[in-house]
Image (cartoon, grey):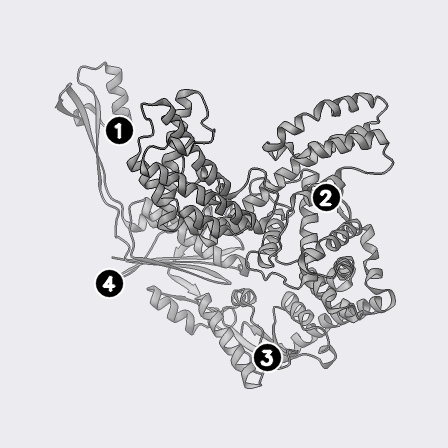
Amino acid sequence: MPDLLIELFSEEIPARMQAKASEDLKRLVTDGLVEAGLTYGGAAAFATPRRLTLALDELTPESPTLREERKGPRTDAPEKALDGFLRSTGLTRDQLEVRDDKKGQFYFAVVEKPGRPAAEIVAEVLERTIRTFPWPKSMRWGAGSLRWVRPLHSILAILTTEEGAEVVPLDIDGIASGDTTRGHRFHAPEAFSVTSFEDYAAKLKRAHVVLDPAERADHIWTEATNMAFAQGLEVVEDKGLLAEVAGLVEWPVVLMGPIGEQFLDLPPEVLQTSMKEHQKFFSVRNADGKIVKYVTVANRETADDGATILAGNGKVLTARLSDAKFFWENDLQTVRERGLTGMAEPLANVTFHNKLGSQAERIARIAALAREIAPLVGADPEQAQQAAEIAKADLSSEMVYEFPELQGLMGRYYAEAAGLPQPVANAAEQHYSPLGPNDDVPTEPVSVAVALADKLDTLTGFWAIDEKPTGSKDPYALRRAALGVIRLVLENGVAGSLRERLYQMIVAQLVDDDDLSEEIRHAKNLIELYKWALTDQRKTADAIKIIPEISETMKRLDSATAAQERYLTSFVVATVRTRDLLSFFADRLKVHLRSEGIRHDVIDAALPQDWDGDILLLVNRVRALQAFLDTEDGANLLAGYTRATSILAAEEAKDGVSYEMDPNPDLAETDSERALFTALDRAEPQVRDALDAEAFADAMSALAALRDPLDAFFEGTLINADNQIIRRNRLCLLNRIRVLFDRIADFGRIEGGKGR
């Protein structure tokens, strides 16, 4: 079987595109070959700055011959039916076969599609791949129509067998395929021919090209760390930068250079960021954590062992770090003269969102909320408010303007320079966290308070203006903010309801409470009583009683302005949007708990219909329920619950009544029936006390004690007894079981518990 080697040789491919491009080449070619009937043993794709390479081994030499039989019309069918069948098969009448069928004689067409040689198929698939390649950006050059990321110079395409190598014939806009490639742009620019992948890789290595990006990255890291170790230093690990640099060179030459003494007092993160973003340099630190040197990777060897390269890099680096030093010193001067509140003053002129005000207005909201949250997380309210007021001051700094990725971190440095308490300074850095599912969660109380306030303000603000995530679109990172709140709450054990706080924050965005008449205030208070009717069905009946008074009050407000009417309407709007935001939190919670193996239906079962947003309480309930269901008792009891509710639902539907009366133990006739009454009498107070104490595991244990009595009841008791009084009593007993289970969770929402 032949081996296939493809190389697409071009001008420099951006490093960020190389990995995906090599995988796309592999996917498009292999998929196309398989669809055409070829198979292969293995495939490997590689990329360097100037080439994409694909190697396939054990490719079948040709596609198989395909034989297809198609049944046509009856032999006595109209002529037009036969003509249509002949056109669809491409055959003539004398090429058809007549066969007997149980319904008569029919025409059959036997169509054979002969196999094609691999070279023909490869040429066809490769041309289609090149012409439709999914580059993020591409260009045309010259007079041709071909588009590629950079001008494409040559196409190497050969099939290698024991007899030798065969060029796959192909011509795309004047670029003819061949068996030649080129080595390093400077060290080996001349073309050379190859006969196989092994020959190709070996000759490239001799021509100063390391084909495998992983090998280039390993070489760079090994050389850099060895150089640093020899001088008692350490290279700061950066896997993203390593992958990028490996995509910039074909022949990596690692060099280490010094950083000017005048820059060593800059924060290490400033040095690291400046060198990484502008120069693609690795930072090298000493035992004290100071960045003292840098590592650069050249693409060629020089007669002076890189001295000229280092000299040039040193000049550029000095200019870059001089800018960074200037920004740092200017920012420190601002802090000394005006403090962090003075640094933050320009934020009053920076719009956060045109419907949510300026950054300064947002900071004021966050500071007030952080002070309110502080006692819940064990933080000092004064420090929490102070931290929130200065946490975003560095957004006005010159350093963050130049390097936005340093926001928060520079806030900590400036807060420390201003002599603020360390918890306040730390909150400036940590309040953005967590930024993702794997990011560290702040644990210092002041940082937790500010981080929660920041994320809750973001969520309630955008919910108030109805700017919610839709589908895959989430321009304001609201899913990340909600997940951040969940992780902050769970990992810091923050208990308490979110609902009222979210509601008040949304209301504050929608209405202005100034200069309201007493009549308007009275209507507002009525709506306050009514507002949770949408989220708590148990209170709906009471809330409905208030509606006439609300209506009458509204009718008396004949002189109400449009703004006042919008004010009153906003309370109902806020109720709906609060409920929707809590539902959003529940959805994010399902995503977060998936890693623990907790199913969505278990969360749905534990989620109260009028959930108040107490995330910690809900998760404790969910985890206890999942642990219970994972036991043998839990699984069997769920089956018993399902049986009980299924019987009850069927009989209620048949009789047109609900069996919700208290069952009478004096009417019990069987031992198993009496035993179930006794077990329920014992379990019900235990479950009640456990739920009141939020001891959900204890509630599950009390429920587990019902397993044997419930199983025995179903085995030894006929529910639908002939005596209608006994039958009704037993159905009410099943309802008592349903009610007890429903106090813990809605077991009917659990897969396998669909009893209603």
Distance from Cα at disc 3 to Cα at disc 1? 71 Å
Tag 3: amino acid: Met
Please report the residue visible at 24 percent of the width from the left and 63 percent of the height from the top: 162
Q: Position of residue 392 (x, y in %)?
A: 75, 58
**Which is more N-terminal, label 1 or label 3?**
1
Q: Is residue 597 left or right of residue 449?
A: left
Name which residue lies at 33% across and 64% down.
Answer: 196
Residue that label 1 marks: 90
Q: With respect to residue 756, does 56 lie above or below?
A: below
Q: Earlier in the sequence, mark 4 or mark 3?
A: 4
- Label 3 Cα crowd, 10 Å radius (few <14 / some 14-19 / many 20+): some
**Secondary-structure class at tag 3:** strand
Name the amino acid type tagged 2: Met
Q: Which residue is mark 2?
A: 505
Location of mark 4 (residue): 162
Secondary structure category for the residue under label 1:
loop
In front: label 2 or label 3: 2
Q: Amino acid at mark 4?
A: Glu
> Can residue 123 be spotted in the picture?
no
Residue that carries the numbered disc 3 in the rendered image:
256
Tell whether label 1 touches label 2 (CB within 8 Å).
Answer: no
Q: Position of residue 708 (x, y in %)?
A: 34, 45
Within the image, what quadrant is residue 414 found in?
bottom right
Residue 755 position by quadrant:
top left
Which of marks 3 and 2 precedes in the sequence? Answer: 3
